[in-house]
Image (cartoon, rainbow, N blue to C red):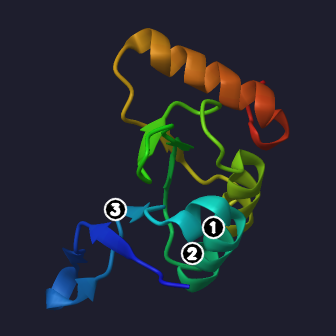
Amino acid sequence: MNFNYYFVGAGAWGSGGTRIPLIYSIHIHITTPRRYFYNDEFLVECFEKLHGTIVSCHLKDILLKPDYTFQLQECACGEGTLNLELYAQLASAENPHMPMIIEHLTTDEEYVASVKYVRERLGIYSDHH
C-alpha cells in the first residue's frame, strides 16, 4: 500500500543549539480508490508507521462524489464513510488525551453540528458527554 503523508512544521531549537523535533500537524490523505474503500487498513498503517510522533489528529470525513470519475471530497463528520470509531480508537491508543481537531467547515453552525455528532457517535472516547 502506498503511504503518503506530509509534515507541517519542522521543529524547534533547544538550548545549546540542539534541534528538538516537533510535529505540528500530520495530514494523512485518502486519495486513491484503495485508500477510500479500505480506509481501515490505511488508518492502521498510518498509526503504526507514525507511532510515537503523533501529537494531534485532524478529524474529518471523506465522501465519494457521485460523478463519473473518482472524486473524493472532505466533508463534515458523519457525512462520509470514514470509520470514525477506528480512528478514535487508534488516536486514543497513541495518546489517551489526543487532541482531535475538526477543520475545513464553513460556518459556526457546521462546527457545532459536527462536534455534537462526534460526541454522540464517539461518546465513550470523549471526556465531555
State the image coordinates of residue 53 (x, y, percent, origin top left). Answer: 49, 76
What is the three-letter code of the residue carrying label 3? Tyr
Real-space CA distance between mark 1 and mark 2, rounded to the nearest whole angstrom: 5 Å
Residue depth check, mark 1 versus mark 3: number of the one nearer the observer: 1
Real-space CA distance between mark 3 and mark 2, rounded to the nearest whole angstrom: 16 Å
Secondary structure beneath label 3 = loop
State the image coordinates of residue 32 (x, y, percent, origin top left). Answer: 47, 66
Secondary structure beneath label 2 = helix
Please tell me whether residue 115 is drawn above or below residue 40 in the rendered image: above
Check disc 2 and report the residue beneath it.
Answer: 46
Q: Counting residues from the N terminus, which is met first, the one under dot 1 or under dot 3?
A: 3
Real-space CA distance between mark 1 and mark 3, rounded to the nearest whole angstrom: 19 Å
Q: Counting residues from the N terminus, which is met first, the one under dot 3 or under dot 2?
A: 3
What is the three-letter code of the residue carrying label 1? Leu
Query: What mark, if any, has residue 24 been given in the picture?
Result: 3
State the image coordinates of residue 119 (x, y, percent, origin top left). Answer: 72, 28
Classify 10 Å Cα crowding around label 2: few (below 14), some (14-19), many (20 and above). some
Q: Is residue 126 left or right of residue 12?
A: right
Q: How many marks?
A: 3
Secondary structure beneath label 1 = helix
Classify 10 Å Cα crowding around label 1: few (below 14), some (14-19), many (20 and above). many
Classify 10 Å Cα crowding around label 3: few (below 14), some (14-19), many (20 and above). some
Residues at discs 1 and 2 in contact (Cβ within 8 Å): yes
Residue displayed at 60% across by 30% down: 79
Query: What mark, if any, has residue 43 been given in the picture?
Result: 1
Residue displayed at 48% across by 42% down: 101
